[in-house]
Amino acid sequence: MKLVPRSGRVLDLGCGTGILTERLAMRDPRVQIVGVDITPDYLEEYEERLRRKPWITAQPMLGNAETVPLEGEFDAVVSSYLAKYVDADRLLGNITPHLKRDGIFIAHDFTLPTNPLYLSAWQAYTWAMNRVGPVLYPEFHTVFEDGLTGLIRRTRWFDALTETLRGHGFEGIHRKRLSFETAGLVWAIKV
């Protein structure tokens, strides 16, 4: 949140039900947000959030972040829990022309810990969640049963995104591991 400009125009990729959109608008209701998500059910919830909270200035768009047709320029592009699902080059090829000069790109997602102690704890936690989760939350069975865990093990988004940002002319590229290395944050400035 601290990295996102307080006002201007923000593209929220993989906006889901609008949690990040709402938090951005709470900081400054003047911010204009375009929320993009590929899941119609999530966008219905997003639109419901906008109806309940008319002080949020946002426009929902159904589409794939890699290919969604965008209009105008943005001061910031943010995404949370999207990077592991997309091809970084296709994503940046689509959004970079719409990010203003000196605009910021920010991505946050799960990562596989590299520290052996954190990795052991993560493995124990995911092992337990993959067994207990489907019992407690049967509607999320695809998340459990090793689906998300396997994806987190396979993805290399944290490294790939950093290299791809360089290839698309971004500078000031930063990376930070969070939450005992179970998540990562990558941000960069378009020059």
Image (spheres, rainbow, N blue to C red):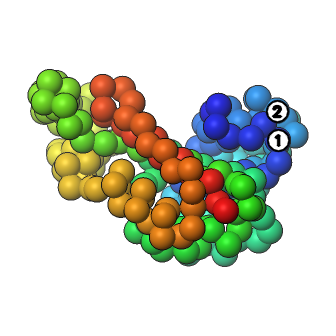
- Residue drawn at (42%, 56%), measured in percent from left and top? 162
> Which residue carries the number 1 mark?
7
- Residue 99: quadrant of the picture: bottom right
The x and y percentages for residue 4 are 68, 40
Q: Amino acid at mark 1?
A: Ser
Residue 124 shown left or right of residue 15 in the figure: left
Residue 163 in view: yes
Q: Is residue 90 above or below residue 88?
A: below
Quarter of the picture containing the N terminus is: top right
The x and y percentages for residue 123 are 14, 32
Nearer to me, 5 or 141: 5
Q: Is residue 32 above or below residue 131?
A: below
Residue 53 in view: no
Q: Is residue 82 above or below residue 73?
A: above
Q: Residues at badges 2 and 1 in contact (C-beta under 8 Å)?
A: yes
Q: Is residue 6 above or below residue 86?
A: above
The x and y percentages for residue 145 are 17, 45
The x and y percentages for residue 9 are 79, 52
- Residue 45: quadrant of the picture: top right
Q: Earlier in the sequence, mark 2 or mark 1?
A: 1
> Which residue carries the number 2 mark?
28
Residue 108 shown left or right of residue 71 in the figure: left
Residue 174 shown left or right of residue 54 in the figure: left
Distance from the alpha carbon under mark 2 to that under mark 1: 6 Å
Residue 174 shown left or right of residue 4 in the figure: left
- Residue drawn at (36%, 26%), measured in percent from left and top? 179
- Residue 164: quadrant of the picture: bottom left
- Residue drawn at (77%, 71%), measured in percent from left and top? 71
Label 2 Cα neighbours within 10 Å, binned few <14 / some 14-19 / many ≥20: some
